[in-house]
Amino acid sequence: MSLPAFFEWLEGTWASIAIRESILFYPLVETTHVLTLCLFLGMTATWDLRLVGLTMRKVPVSEIVNRLWPWAMAGFALMVISGLLLFLSGPVRASQNIFFQVKMVMLALAGVNAFVFHQTVFRWVEEWDMAPAVPRRAKLAGASSLVLWAGVVVCGRMQAYNWFD
Amino acid sequence: MDLLPFFQWCEDTALGQVIRDSLWLFPVIEAIHLLALALLGGCILVVDLRLLGLGLRSQSAANLARYIHPWLVGSLLTMIATGVPMFLSEAIKCYYSPPFWYKMSFLAVATVYTFSLRRRVAGADPAKVGPVWGRLVALTSLTLWFCVGFSGRWIAFY
């Protein structure tokens, strides 16, 4: 089964119709998706801003990342669950939407960026935890993360406006 | 006091009209509003989590609140600077929207609370504040800001 055919099938499922036609459930899921931004992106932005040197420069980088990590991941889980439910309510239109497509690409890039950061420069964070200057690679990872996540949010919002549908 | 004439005046402002007539201005302003929301939420959470004894525990709440303060003020001002034009573009709709009035009420309370009581408690010596009082202040803050965000999203639905 091709991907478009799968989305076509998905759109006809009981769950998809139920979410689409619900009066309260859909807005509640959407509200959850938006407000969880505070938890997920709020925490992520905090350590990204620390990496680029714009806040909490006297707090060790490792502490900010490690202590806020569980909160950010809880936010991410809620984001994914609510996002999947929103997608499920109208997979055909969403998957054909250019903003959704760009959003998914940026989401993947943000994931790769975070993975590379954790596998490389964050591994020897003890060496620069409190250094007056954060290593350039870490700074770059923080800046890229801020730009990519901002792009994800903007594309996510634009997706609701059907300019190109 | 009937505020409808004032809302009508808002709706008729040049800025409101420009945004209403534009295909992309409202969504762009809305996207910036959302980015500031993530930042504002993060600023509130970092300090409230600390008051609850969670998150960045090696730092005092007073220190965190001080580091975060410019970002808190900056993101709140960005939210207001983007929220007002969106309101101007659909003031009459807002007038008849119950969630709008809830949001504005919660926003007023949450803002005053954050910059008065919460600020004093977060900045005070924890030994004097006591853990129960600190937690209560943090939970109240989280509840108030959650209500602002929740009712804000529902302006679009009702």
Image: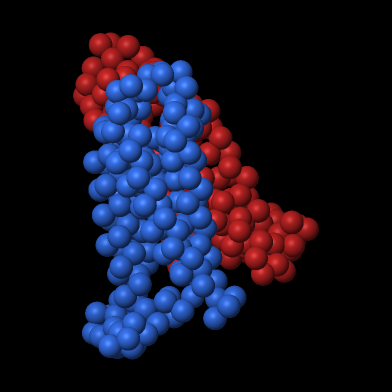
Chain colours: A blue, B red
Number of numbered discs visible in the structure rendering: 0
Residue at (55% x, 76% y) in the render:
A162
Between residue A133 and residue B123, name the one nearer to us: A133
Q: Quadrant of residue A7?
A: bottom left
Expressed as whole percent of the image width and height from the top left, the position of residue A27 reads 37, 67
Residue A70 relative to residue A121: left or right: left
Measured along the vertical axis of the image, is residue A140 above or below residue B24? above
Whether residue B2 is visible, yes or no, is no
Residue at (37% x, 22% y) in the render:
A128
Residue B155 relative to residue A31: left or right: right
Q: Return the residue found at the far right.
A: B14
Expressed as whole percent of the image width and height from the top left, the position of residue B19 reads 69, 62
Between residue B43 and residue B156, name the one nearer to us: B43
Expressed as whole percent of the image width and height from the top left, the position of residue A21 reads 34, 81
Residue at (53% x, 39% y) in the render:
B75
Measured along the vertical axis of the image, is residue A134 above or below residue A86? above
Measured along the vertical axis of the image, is residue A85 above or below residue B80? below
Expressed as whole percent of the image width and height from the top left, the position of residue B125 reads 32, 11
Residue at (30% x, 23% y) in the render:
A126
